[in-house]
Image (cartoon, rainbow, N blue to C red):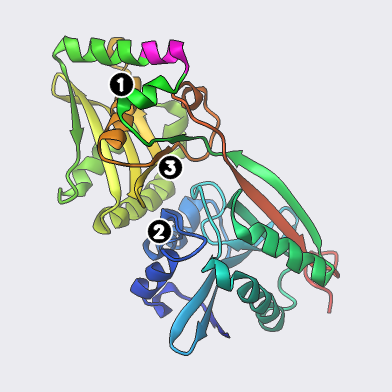
Amino acid sequence: MEFKLHQSFLEFDPIAWNALVEQSVADTPFSRYEYLSAWWQTLGGGEWKQAELILVSAVEGDQLVGVAPLFIAKHDGRVALLLVGSVEVSDYLDLIVREQDLPRFLTGLLDFLASSHNGSWSALDWYNLPDDSPTLAALQAEAEKRGWEHRQEVYRTTPRIALNGSFDDYLANIDKKQRHEIRRKMRRAAESGRVVFRLVDKSAEIEPELESFFHLMTQDPSKASFLHPAMREHMTAALRAAHQNGYLWLAFLEVDGVKSAASLNFDYKNKLWGYNSGVSRDHMELSPGWVLLALTIQWCCENGRSEFDFMRGDEEYKYRFGGKDRRVIRVTAIRAATSPDGAVAQ
């Protein structure tokens, strides 16, 4: 493998990048070129104030074999190499490489980083790796071989609902009390004659739909605080890119012709990835948030989606709808000899 350092996303062919993502251990919306390049423009909506982009590619012949989307920043008292997308707005991250190429790619990557940026970082600090990622074992093996300190911990839970049948099949597999509650609320909404489920067409003009979504999202005070200007800029760019690439899924529940709840997801690889939502405080007697989530799951069942992924967070409603925990992992590999400021000793 021939490794090369890049300091701009513009040095990559987006088509080649995404083609590799789809064959890689990192096949999620959060590793795609359009998402990570948008993330870098605002450094995660302002999550990072200072960072140096370190994009490393590996090629064999004329074929792209691997991409390590990294950046250097001060974190937890040391200078670390983190995955682009870290930490809080990208639910799944990983190296972009085929599983069969991963061990030798990782070995070559760490050797390359030691030669190109030897004194500038003291640790790898990688968040949000799926708990079944082969990168976890590969990185542990590399750390042990190099005499590095290795730490691994659960960072967040990621509840999911497996779907392999009808909506009635789904309901039959959840708690009886919750099954009756979902059916009761859906029936009440339908019998009111006031409620309409509307899925935004993939060819629609997305900007006004995103404005409606953000309006509903900010009805929750904690989400309003989260959606500061830099974060709104990041989310708008990422969601616009997802729409342009055909995998944004946005639906509204309208009550009396007014949007009262929104469900925003990525429709990617035959599953729905639940990115965010919003609910108006009006019409709460019709439980618009619950009804819209139920209708979203029903849509998945009727359209052959294999899973609804709630992604990070252990909110109670996810389990009431039948979510079963998976996890994302934080793994830290600390190089052997470091100076007091966290850089590698020379």
Q: In the drawing, does residue 15 fall left or right of residue 76?
A: left
Amino acid type indicated by mark 2: Tyr
Give the magenta part as a residue range.
Answer: 175-181
| Quadrant including the N terminus | bottom right
Amino acid type indicated by mark 3: His
Q: Which of disc 3 and disc 2 is earlier in sequence?
A: 2
Name the residue carrying label 3. Answer: 228
Q: Nearer the viewer, residue 322 or 44?
A: 322
Residue at disc 2, secondary structure: helix
Residue at disc 3, secondary structure: loop
Q: Which of disc 1 and disc 2 is earlier in sequence?
A: 2
Name the residue carrying label 2. Answer: 35
Identify the residue at horizontal 38%, vertical 42% (top origin): 306
Q: Which of disc 1 and disc 3 is earlier in sequence?
A: 3
> Residue reaching furthest bottom?
61
Q: In the drawing, does residue 23 fall left or right of residue 204?
A: right
Amino acid type indicated by mark 1: Val
| Quadrant including the C terminus | bottom right
Residue at disc 1, secondary structure: helix
Residue 297 visible: yes
Q: Residues within 10 Å of mark 1 (few under 14, many from 20)?
A: many
Q: Based on the picture, tell me whether residue 281 belongs to the magenta stretch.
A: no
Q: In the drawing, does residue 148 fall left or right of residue 207?
A: right
Q: CA distance from mark 2 to mark 1?
A: 30 Å
